[in-house]
Image (cartoon, coloured by chain):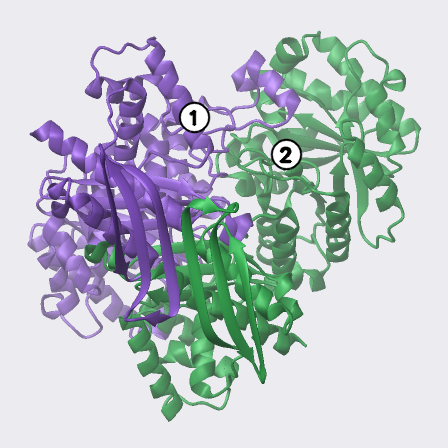
Chain colours: A purple, B green
Amino acid sequence: MTKIAIYDSTLRDGAQAQGISYSVEDKIKIVEQLDALGIRYIEAGNPGSNPKDLEFFARVAALPLKNAKIIAFGSTCKVGVAAAADANVRSLLQAGTKAIAVFGKSWDFHVTDILRTTLEENLRMIGDTVRYLKQRGMEVVFDAEHFFDGYKANAGYAMQTLAAAADAGADCLCLCDTNGGSFPEEIFAITQAVTERFQTAVGIHCHNDGEMAVANSLAAVRAGATQVQGTINGIGERCGNANLCSIVPNLQIKLGYGCLPAESLPRLTSLARYVSEIANLAPNDKAPFVGSHAFAHKGGMHIDAVNKAPTAYEHIDPELVGNRRTILMSEVAGRSTLLATINAIDPGVKRDSPETQRIMDRLKQLEHDGYQFETAESSFELVVRKELGKYQPFFELKQFKVIVNEPSFDGANSSAMIKIRVGDMEEITAAEGDGPVNALDNAVRKALERFYPAIKEMKLTDFKVRVLDSDMASAAKVRVLIESADQHESWTTIGVSTDVINASWLALVDAIEYKLVRDRERA
Amino acid sequence: MTKIAIYDSTLRDGAQAQGISYSVEDKIKIVEQLDALGIRYIEAGNPGSNPKDLEFFARVAALPLKNAKIIAFGSTCKVGVAAAADANVRSLLQAGTKAIAVFGKSWDFHVTDILRTTLEENLRMIGDTVRYLKQRGMEVVFDAEHFFDGYKANAGYAMQTLAAAADAGADCLCLCDTNGGSFPEEIFAITQAVTERFQTAVGIHCHNDGEMAVANSLAAVRAGATQVQGTINGIGERCGNANLCSIVPNLQIKLGYGCLPAESLPRLTSLARYVSEIANLAPNDKAPFVGSHAFAHKGGMHIDAVNKAPTAYEHIDPELVGNRRTILMSEVAGRSTLLATINAIDPGVKRDSPETQRIMDRLKQLEHDGYQFETAESSFELVVRKELGKYQPFFELKQFKVIVNEPSFDGANSSAMIKIRVGDMEEITAAEGDGPVNALDNAVRKALERFYPAIKEMKLTDFKVRVLDSDMASAAKVRVLIESADQHESWTTIGVSTDVINASWLALVDAIEYKLVRDRERA
């Protein structure tokens, strides 16, 4: 079985997509998930162009990664500057990774018309940079930018750029279809010419401008490439990068290559959704393999046939990638996944206990209503506790009223009045805030602190809103995710409603209750 | 130049997509647009399975189409029933079209295990149905369902099913990758085997389950197929059908085939958006060729290169398909990026004009405050217009007040009162809503419609909220992005505030003003 090194650039080239802006915390979470899946390389940022990335590299260096090598990404040294004297090249070493990717020009037109230097100087820049990094012990990937367009324009020169990198010791020559307009048969023929000529490993990096990034990546593998670069969900600038969520199952399930540990593939669908959530992008329902519609059947005849024999209208078994047949998607894919969570709370419950079925039914209902527990494990745990009878409410809401004024009134634009009940006691209070969610958050904490002083330890650390049914515009259902933290841990809760305030309220209540449940367990 | 007959199934196979349901009126509008573009065949429905379709066929027969033939779609006659006696086959003739597509089984497993009949009877059904329709003067396309899977399982039998159709006089043998899991090299080899054996024209019908429908369709054309079936925007069940919006420009612009009249291609982008609008689907910004991000540039280096030579990072000129280049503003973008946007509004402004500096300063201030214009071009354009003095406000906000009640009051949980001024006139009104943003949106539209009736054409299609400084939790700054659309285009606007209501308000005002500015330009 030929092994293929999967090289993820969700955090680097993916960040070039319109609308994407990761926090350092977001990037750490994605690295942990990619590593757990068994991804071989994670290209995580460009320390020379973005000061935020240096903070990230410092934090990621402390993570105990099991599978992945982190890659710092940057360009070759500048025209007329030695690699050792180039600030960007040196910043790559400061990232503290064991592997580095440097991109350089391989299209003569780009050298003469964009860099505005000589073809010889460009070869010097490539060789000098790769050699400098190799001498410092780095594993080096050379990204040959515009390689296919360059080869079509001047094959001899394009090959010389690869030779410059190979001779300097590059560990991998990655051929980039930077403009994304190549065809599979071109990619195949040109990659084959490269793999025949060089002993060095060859990689492929495609973009989707012709809607062929997946086919192009596979064509390169057929021609001998052994490293495939891409992003989760095909996130990337313009039309996106090659989509690893399609490439990996095509290679591993259908063509017999080895990309990920066998046990990882069934986690692909949940990884895809996790990354969408973190990136605050609506998941693509139509996405091959991992989309919620990918194995959905509508026509009556199709459904009948699928009932007779699933392969009648399915190219693979959806469970192989952790997806499932039907129209209503459940993130809690299987009963055994669910059982693990249940048994953490009540070890006595069995696979076929009535509780298990009841919880399954409740989760299906909530998912149908727009809940998604992939990222909101704490709300999920509270649902399970409620169904198991292992839950006592900490307080009861009697009512709240929130008022937003424009222009602001007495310095605050929002105020909230709230009335709650704890045991036999009632508390009514009010608070102001910057905006209605903040006012409500302040008011409920103020009301509860009298009963539960530990609430002061907790803070909200992130707040995300997603519209679920965008056809309904501002009256659509919204899903709010709230991330909270105290001195012990951080946790995420979810609320769904047609009203952003109500959805926030539901997520806020879960956040507070989760804190109080955990405190009681710790006590 | 080889001519390729483009065969659109947006209205038939596209209607199998989850969430799609066209009215008869919708279908008529789409037929008119496809015909105007020069599409050769429009597969419009299945008169046997859907009574609404018979009404549609009666209406479409009266349309004066210039280019397209309408196709009625159905299956071969049933097991044990003569074509002449089969109600579904006869309903195809009632549709009153000049051309008909019938699908039949070409995979032996489907014949024996799904139809549960003999291989011979299936050949009889195909031949009998095609012959019956040909005798009644129809042009007949035979859709060989699961042809590629069938060929891989039993090539001899798959070929016999085509021979049954060809011998009965079929005008085109269309090879279907029904489960969407084939690879381009398989499609190429198998299609070539068919084109070498049969004199009859060959078509290709692909699905996108492996994310290769476009590459697969092109592979079939290279192997001699001359009819390509697909849908606008790749709408279709599961992961969609082959996307004609990518196939046509790949074939015609890049590979030199003739698909559409030359003057039609620049209307492809607006057609794609029109169909999204009618189908009530959010347009795919990342769509190759026709998406609003397809020619968007973000990184400073890319932008610099694109300004030097557009082909540096673009595989085709966006104007060839009626799309346009967009330069995304971000911290990394420089003065030349900005100048391109300024000059689209005022060509007289120079790189070193005081206006340019003033706009740079203003943008830096806004970005520092949390604005991010790379996704919100329309807000960006409004900022530039304001600084250039090319902007007159359409209305002035005097005040608003939003109230959220829990529990709900009289069925609505939110209400908004708003007072605005337009010229010398004031308007004060109120509206309810599902949540405060919806209530405010409803109130401001109600107040403005009296002055600007065109606001009714516009709708909000997406709404995203992101917390900027998550350490501040619910009092943190939030960034709201609102996506709006009318019959012409879609646009995104931004608002930043510590208050989600205020941020939404700012984005909402920009959305409305952008609509009114563009309407004035179009007038």
* Residues at circles 1 and 2 in contact by the CB criterion of under 8 Å: no
Q: What residue would you read off at disc 1?
A: A364
**Number of dots carrying numbers:** 2
Residue drawn where x is 60% and y is 36% of the image: B17
Q: Amino acid at mark 1?
A: Lys
Judged left or right of residue A355, residue B391 is: right
Judged left or right of residue B354, residue B76 is: right
Provide the secondary structure element on which disc 1 rests.
helix
Q: Chain of mark 2?
A: B
Q: Amino acid at mark 2?
A: Gln
Q: What residue would you read off at disc 2?
A: B16
Q: Residues within 10 Å of mark 1 (few under 14, many from 20)?
A: some
Q: Quadrant of residue B71?
A: top right
Measure the alpha-carbon separation of dots 1 and 2: 24 Å
Provide the secondary structure element on which disc 2 rests.
helix
Do circles 1 and 2 both sit on a common chain?
Answer: no
Q: Residues within 10 Å of mark 2 (few under 14, many from 20)?
A: many
Res B446 seen here: yes
Judged left or right of residue A456, residue A151 is: right
Residue in front for this viewpoint, A128 or B516: B516
Res A67 seen here: no
Residue drawn where x is 71% and y is 29% of the image: B143
In the depicted structure, whether residue A133 falls above or below residue B372: above
Image quadrant in which the C terminus of chain A is located = top left
Residue in front for this viewpoint, B490 or B10: B490
In the depicted structure, whether residue A417 falls above or below residue B267: above
Residue B253, x across and y down, in percent? 60, 58
Residue A92, x across and y down, in percent? 14, 59
